[in-house]
Amino acid sequence: MPPTIHLVRHAQGFHNLCVENESLRDPDLTALGEQQCADLRSAFPSHARLTGLVASPLRRTIQTCDLAFGGADKLYPIVLLDTLQEVSGAPCDTGSSKAALRAEFGDKIDLQRVRDSWTEKGEGSAFEPTMEALMARAKTARRALREMAGDGDDEIAVVSHGGFLHFLTDDWDGVPLDQATAWTNCMCRSYQFAESPDDKDDVRLVETKESWARRQPASRQPLTATEQREIRAIVQKRLLPYLKIKA
């Protein structure tokens, strides 16, 4: 069996409660968010097969990963991957320093893949909220996850953000007209890797049949790679103001 990654959007954070809360820097999970993690922990079918945990370095993703999947010694530390952070430069999507994360989470996290500059999202940064930079960052993140997954049948849980998960998976299907993402808080989808038809240096994430069946009517089929490419530009343009992305 090829490796599988279980992608998860973080649980509800205080910034999800209202637009005004987006001014909070690197916010915590709400009480409902903590319950969402407990619910995911109960419902997730593959705990025994997990061999690793990965998360964006924002506090809400670390907390979600720990509460939903942590516990077995073999899964710690949670590997933090700075390319998995959320798309915008808003305070709520800007993380804490490595020193602050180390002080809060200690040995539960591995910061080796987090650059000191990971909180800088200005012009020219790898984390600048532009479409070009986000597409490049998603490619880098996919390659890193493919490397971390190895060549066996490992299963890894990866916690990221609703906006960035569309870039990471290159799946733009089902985004509501008045929302920034089709991923609900603590939604989990499972993927395997495939070759990219467009770029030999990239990899593609393909949702497993089981994952698709859990969240879609039996009569509906997933979009093909060609169909995804056709709707990508349309959906991305519509999401610009919601995700605070510069074209």
Image (spheres, grey):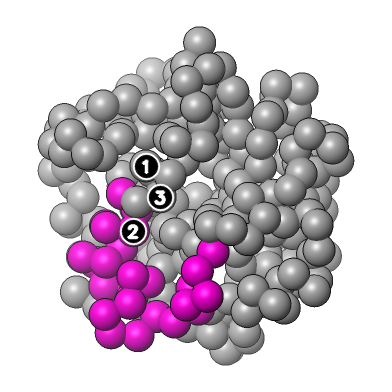
On the rendered structure, is 127 left or right of 81?
A: left
In this orientation, does residue 98 appear?
yes
10 Å neighbourhood of mark 2: few (<14), some, or many (≥20)?
A: many
Q: Mark 1 sits on what residue?
A: 143
10 Å neighbourhood of mark 3: few (<14), some, or many (≥20)?
A: many
Q: How many marks?
A: 3
On the rendered structure, is 136 left or right of 150?
A: left
**Does dot 3 land on a helix, a strand or a loop?**
helix
Specify start and end residues of the magenta stretch as a single range: 114-139
**Which x, y percent locates residue 222?**
33, 27
10 Å neighbourhood of mark 1: few (<14), some, or many (≥20)?
A: some
Using the rendered view, name the quadrant where residue 247 is placed: bottom left
Using the rendered view, name the quadrant where residue 120 is placed: bottom left
Which kind of residue does numbered mark 2 sit on? Answer: Arg
Q: Mark 2 sits on what residue?
A: 137
Q: Residue at x 13, y 43 (%)?
A: 230
Label 3 near label 2: C-beta < 8 Å? yes
Q: State the predominant SS element of the stretch in magenta.
A: loop
For marks 2 and 1 on the same chain, the one whose residue lies earlier in the sequence: 2
Q: Residue at x 35, y 51 (%)?
A: 140
Which kind of residue does numbered mark 3 sit on? Answer: Ala
- On whether residue 123 falls in the magenta region, the answer is yes
Label 3 near label 1: C-beta < 8 Å? yes
Alpha-carbon span between mark 1 and mark 3: 5 Å
**Does dot 1 land on a helix, a strand or a loop?**
helix
Q: Mark 3 sits on what residue?
A: 141
**Which x, y percent locates residue 188?**
59, 39
> Would you place residue 123 above or below residue 40 in this image?
below
